[in-house]
Image (cartoon, rainbow, N blue to C red):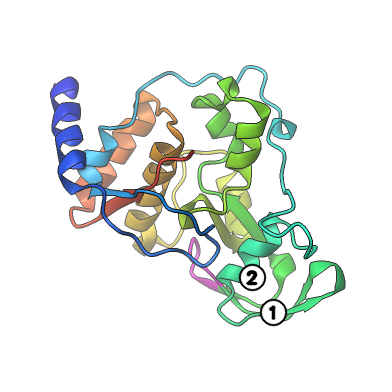
Amino acid sequence: MIKNLRRVALAAALLLAPLAAPTPAHAQHRPAETYTLPMAASVHLLPVAAEMRDGYQRTSFKHWNAGQNPTDGCNTRAEVLLAEAVERPQILPGCKLSGGRWWSYYDARWLTSASALDVDHMVPLAEAWDSGASQWTAERREAYANDLAVNPSLVAVSAASNRSKADQDPAQWLPPAVEVTCRYTSEWIATKLRWGLTADAAELEALTQHAEACPGTTVTYEPAP
């Protein structure tokens, strides 16, 4: 049954892709293909495998690096904060951010201090390790941890919501703002597809249930180089 569903999903992907997608504010400008398909179909493109935490260290993923412009003093974290600011902060020497205003979509909160925000890895580093990144080179793990090329990979949210999430997948944690569940799970799937990461059985079951509850939601992803 699962094999048949994957064949249907792959057929849907081929019919619906590539489609043009808007370039996010902090995306690098380079030619690439994006793929858009129904969320229910996208779930079945995820490879299924047991998770392995053996050997994980957060330092295995170098972050934050110098970002897209190594000469401006703004690292990846600062670049995401600048890109997602609803009201742009003042940039002080050393890329210290003063003022500004942000919307934390996980918990539907306005924040007015950069220090009150975390930049979340949509798929946490530990989860990425468990799902295949343990086999990557150090360079690829660094690219993953500082992925500015597509919008969902890194997201500025309240520190409280990010730390509540920790390294949990959607079978274990969802944003407290229930109205964003479809968006969140769509972006989770997009990130896993982008980087070729696997899903375990419990995660796949949860994503399948969310896809059924979000019939109008699509997943757009761009395979990582």
The residue most toward the right is 93
Label 1 is placed on what type of residue?
Answer: Pro
Label 2 is placed on what type of residue?
Answer: Leu
In percent of the image, x 60 and y 37: which residue is there? 125
In percent of the image, x 58 and y 62: which residue is there? 157
The local crowd at label 1, few if under 14, some if 14 to 19, many if 20 or more residues have their Cα within 10 Å, is some
Q: Quadrant of the N terminus?
A: top left
Element under disc 1: loop
Label located before the other in sequence (2 or 1): 2
Measured along the vertical axis of the image, is residue 94 above or below residue 56? below
Question: In this orientation, which residue lies closer to the viewer: 145 or 222?
Answer: 222
Which label sits on residue 172? none
Cβ–Cβ below 8 Å for labels 2 and 1?
yes
In percent of the image, x 70 and y 34: which residue is there? 58
Measured along the vertical axis of the image, is residue 172 above or below residue 158? above
Measured along the vertical axis of the image, is residue 100 above or below residue 42? below
The total of numbered circles placed on residues is 2
Element under disc 2: helix
Question: In this orientation, which residue lies closer to the viewer: 158 or 217?
Answer: 217
Which label sits on residue 82? 2
The residue wearing badge 1 is 89
The span picked out in magenta is 103-109
Rendered image quadrant of residue 181: bottom left
Residue 31, how many percent across, how many down? Answer: 43, 53
